[in-house]
Image: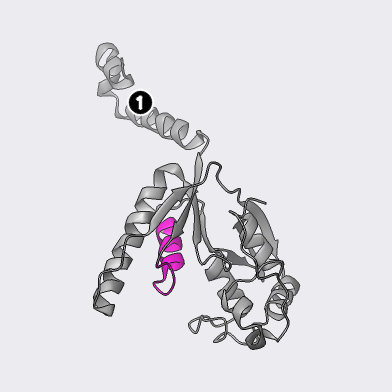
Amino acid sequence: MTSIQQGFLFGYVWNPSALQKTAERQHLKRTEAPTEMKTVELSGEVQGIGLRRIAHGKLDELGVPGQAVNDARTSNVYLTAPSYAIDEVLAAIKERQVEKGKERGRALPDLEVRELKKALPLKDVRITPAMVKKFVSGQGLTDLAQGKSPSASSPEQWIGDRFRLKEEDGTLTGGLSPLALKQLKVKEPVYREQLDNPERYGGVIRWSNGHKEAPTA
């Protein structure tokens, strides 16, 4: 028997205040339930369509944790989000594919979606101005145009948009997957071009050019 049915039996249905409190308790119970996270690997034509931006925009709209990060070695994207939100994010990405297809005069093929056995954890971080400076220098991103984000007005905004971090008093905060954290620590490249054309990024090969499995650590 539901609480509303009980209300009919005991007369609470005539008490709007009691019904409101019941609804609030039920909502609180749902929001307190642990969130099951899921990670899917997206492969195919994932570059040049604004996939990460669309994914982050949808996650912001839903008000849920999550992140999309590009793997420079494979060109694939790893999307981590609550299980119940994954389909909505993928639907938004599909809409973007259709739009891009019309712009290019051809339909883009569907992306391949593979669910990882275990969701990539999102670690809470605080990125200080010193860390931002180290990232820009270490990645060889001497200017924002080279970082392929002409709309960004500062390195902090560029990093915040790319990794879905929020700026608070000069510090970037948010949750990062293992791969994203490695990229921010300059242990992994952010672009495939850094591996193929290192001369454009300081002329130093900082990473091996080999491929790897899903970035779980």
Q: How many marks?
A: 1
Say which element carries label 1.
Answer: helix
Give the position of the N terminus as an image quadrant: top left
As drawn, is 74 to the left or to the right of 24?
A: right
Identity, as a three-letter code, of the amino acid under mark 1: Ala
Question: Does residue 82 belong to the magenta stretch?
Answer: no
Question: Label 1: which residue?
Answer: 18
Q: Residues within 10 Å of mark 1 (few under 14, many from 20)?
A: few
For the residue pair 165 and 134, the one nearer the viewer reads as: 134
**Quadrant of the rendered image containing residue 130:** bottom right
Name the spot of residue 203 as percent of width and height, x first.
Answer: 70, 86
Which residue is outermost to the front?
Answer: 210
As drawn, is 187 to the left or to the right of 94?
A: right
Name the spot of residue 173 as percent of width and height, x first.
Answer: 63, 61
In the image, residue 17 sits, relative to residue 81, either above or below, namely: above
Name the spot of residue 121 as percent of width and height, x first.
Answer: 61, 48
Question: Does residue 52 belong to the magenta stretch?
Answer: yes
SS majority, magenta: helix
Q: Which residues, given as a range, are shown in magenta? A: 45-60
**Colouring rule applied to residues:** one colour
**Quadrant of the rendered image containing residue 44:** bottom left
Residue pictured at 73% horizontal, 82% vertical: 204
**Quadrant of the rendered image containing residue 179:** bottom right
Which residue is outermost to the top?
Answer: 9
Name the spot of residue 59 as percent of width and height, x first.
Answer: 44, 56
In the image, residue 87 sits, relative to residue 144, either above or below, namely: above
Residue pictured at 73% horizontal, 75% vertical: 206
Residue pictured at 50% horizontal, 33% vertical: 33
In the image, residue 129 sits, relative to residue 76, either above or below, namely: below
